[in-house]
Image (tube, grey):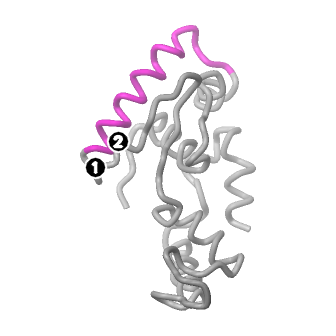
């Protein structure tokens, strides 16, 4: 897994991933990125961060096209099965693997896949560990760990 080195870009990516498929408003992003006290240049800086994130996504997986600008914000339109969080949620709820026909479970059994995801989490450490100093991620990180 490759993540951006710059903290604000990592934070932006994390916010968009956690809320993938939904528009994250331009108004809420600066408050999350700067812990409720954005600089007066926040709108401009946010545009620069989004541009840098698109470049990063293009270089590391050709995903820049999935970061879509909407009238009031941005949405990361990523298939749920591409995010460990969504796959874990689906498996925890007992849903069949993506693309399965009713009564069919292609790919690893849910229990085996859950075990694999838990092992990955154990290797990586607590969810959002490097971003927990930001209020937007402290509670979310703890909830994801649970």
Kindly check if marks 1 and 2 are in contact, taking CB atoms under 8 A apart as contact: yes
Is residue 42 part of the magenta span, yes or no? yes
**138 or 18, nearer to the observer:** 18
Q: Is residue 113 above or below residue 64?
A: below
* Mark closer to the observer (1, 2): 2
The residue located at (46%, 29%) in the rendering is 69
Q: Which residue is mark 2?
A: 65
Which quadrant is the N terminus positioned in? Answer: bottom left
The residue located at (60%, 85%) in the rendering is 102
Residue 62 bears which disc, if any? 1
The residue located at (47%, 88%) in the rendering is 106
Is residue 132 part of the magenta span, yes or no? no
Q: Is residue 26 above or below residue 8?
A: above
**27 or 105, nearer to the observer:** 105
Dot 2 falls on a residue whose secondary structure is: helix
The magenta-colored residue range is 37-58
Residue 2 bears which disc, if any? none
For marks 1 and 2, give the CA distance: 8 Å
The residue located at (68%, 77%) in the rendering is 92
């Amino acid at each position: 897994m490759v993540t951006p080195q710059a903290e604000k870009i990592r934070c932006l990516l994390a916010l968009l991933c956690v809320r993938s498929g939904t528009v994250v408003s331009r108004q809420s992003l600066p408050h999350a990125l700067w812990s409720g006290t954005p600089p007066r240049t926040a709108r401009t800086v946010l545009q620069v961060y989004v541009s840098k994130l698109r470049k990063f996504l293009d270089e590391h997986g050709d995903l820049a096209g999935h970061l879509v600008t909407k009238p009031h914000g941005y949405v990361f339109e990523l298939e749920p099965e591409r995010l460990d969080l969504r796959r874990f949620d689906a498996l925890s709820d007992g849903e069949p693997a993506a693309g399965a026909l009713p009564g069919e479970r292609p790919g690893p059994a849910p229990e085996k896949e859950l075990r694999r995801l838990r092992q990955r989490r154990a290797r990586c450490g607590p969810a959002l560990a490097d971003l927990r100093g930001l209020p937007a991620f402290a509670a979310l990180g703890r909830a994801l760990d649970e």
